[in-house]
Image (spheres, helix red, strand yellow):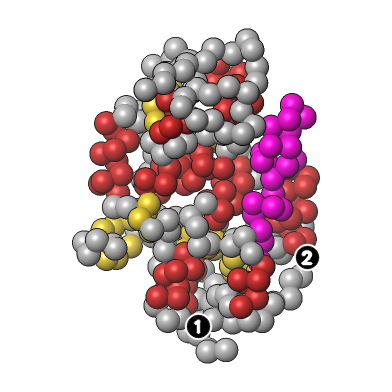
Amino acid sequence: MKRTKYVGPAAIVLIAWMAFALTSTAGAEVVYPKLLIKAEVLAESLEAPNLRIVDCRRKVEDYQMGHIPGAVFLNVFGKLRTTSPSGVIGVRRMLEEQEEVFGRTLGITSETMVVLYDDTGWDATRLFWELSYAGHEKVAILYGGWPEWQKKGLPVSTETPGIKPQVFISRPNPEILATTGYVLANLSNPKVALLDCRPPEQFVGTKKHPKAAVAGRIPGAVNVFTLTNWENKTYLKPPDELEEVFEDKGITRDKIIVNYCNTGYLASNTYFVLKVLGYPNVKMYDFSWVEWSGKDYLPKTVQIK
């Protein structure tokens, strides 16, 4: 394995949280505020202590064929999702189960700096939200993901690193979670904006998730499909372009933003986008439309075009 430059125990934390400029896929230089880390910077930090890189791609075969040196594998889609007591699929596991995954499976402690990557843009952001909800704030995502790492010709390994099980202590952050009751109580609150992160056809009601009881949306919600925030799935669009889209929809910094989708997967992706942009008050309704649509007493809007 190619040796890498050691940058000191605190450097990786600083690197991940400082603003950086880079050239976008469109050729323009943009500055991202924080929570993203450049591939070249991570490559120089691979030997930093208290660093855990997590490969969030879905196929272990892809990981075995090649991954970032030192990265451990976690199928977020398969390992961290479960079914709620009310039958909502794909939602987060109990905190005790998360602690097992984060501590014993991934070897993360409160001192660990975590860097996540995938090749689809969906899974790393889901793990980002779950770690954030569990109170772990030292988390960043690799800009461009695995495609960027490969494009830069950076070191690749086929070795599976040993993991020393650790004790992960959750410190839940309820401020970033929205429940059904919270959403219902704030439907008419002008200080709360509901952001539907699903594809437009699900928002207007021409299509629905297989597990949703009916098609439609939560009343008062606006729609920005989360994949439209990215170029080629893993490259975040320039901040000024993203902010213009959100502001046009009434998603402004003075409001509490509540993201939802069908089961929270897309909503957690938009949660990450808004946090990168520096939105101060963002929540994720992780049971989302699959739960909401199945409760007869909850109001619904259907607008088929």
Of the numbered discs in the image, which one, if any, rests on residue 194? Answer: none
- Residue sticking out furthest to the left: 28
Question: Is residue 283 found left or right of 73 in the rendered image?
Answer: left
Q: Is residue 298 above or below residue 31?
A: above
Q: Is residue 106 above or below residue 215?
A: below
The magenta region covers 73-94
Q: Nearer the viewer, mark 2 or mark 1?
A: 1
Identity of the residue drawn at 54% across and 21% down: 183
Q: Which residue is mark 2?
A: 165
Tell me the element at label 2.
Answer: loop
Q: Examine the structure image and report whether residue 162 is included in the region drawn in magenta.
A: no
Task: Tell me which label, 2 or 1, sits earlier in the chain.
Answer: 1
Camera-nearest residue between 125 and 190: 125
Which image quadrant: the N terminus?
bottom right
Spatial separation of the CA atoms under disc 2 and disc 1: 26 Å
Camera-nearest residue between 199 and 170: 199
State the image quarter where residue 184 is shown.
Answer: top right
Inspect the image, locate mark 2, and give the three-letter code of the amino acid beneath it: Pro
Q: Which residue is mark 1?
A: 155
Inspect the image, locate mark 1, and give the three-letter code of the amino acid beneath it: Pro
State the image quarter where residue 242 is shown.
Answer: top left
Q: Position of residue 252 (x, y in %)?
A: 33, 31
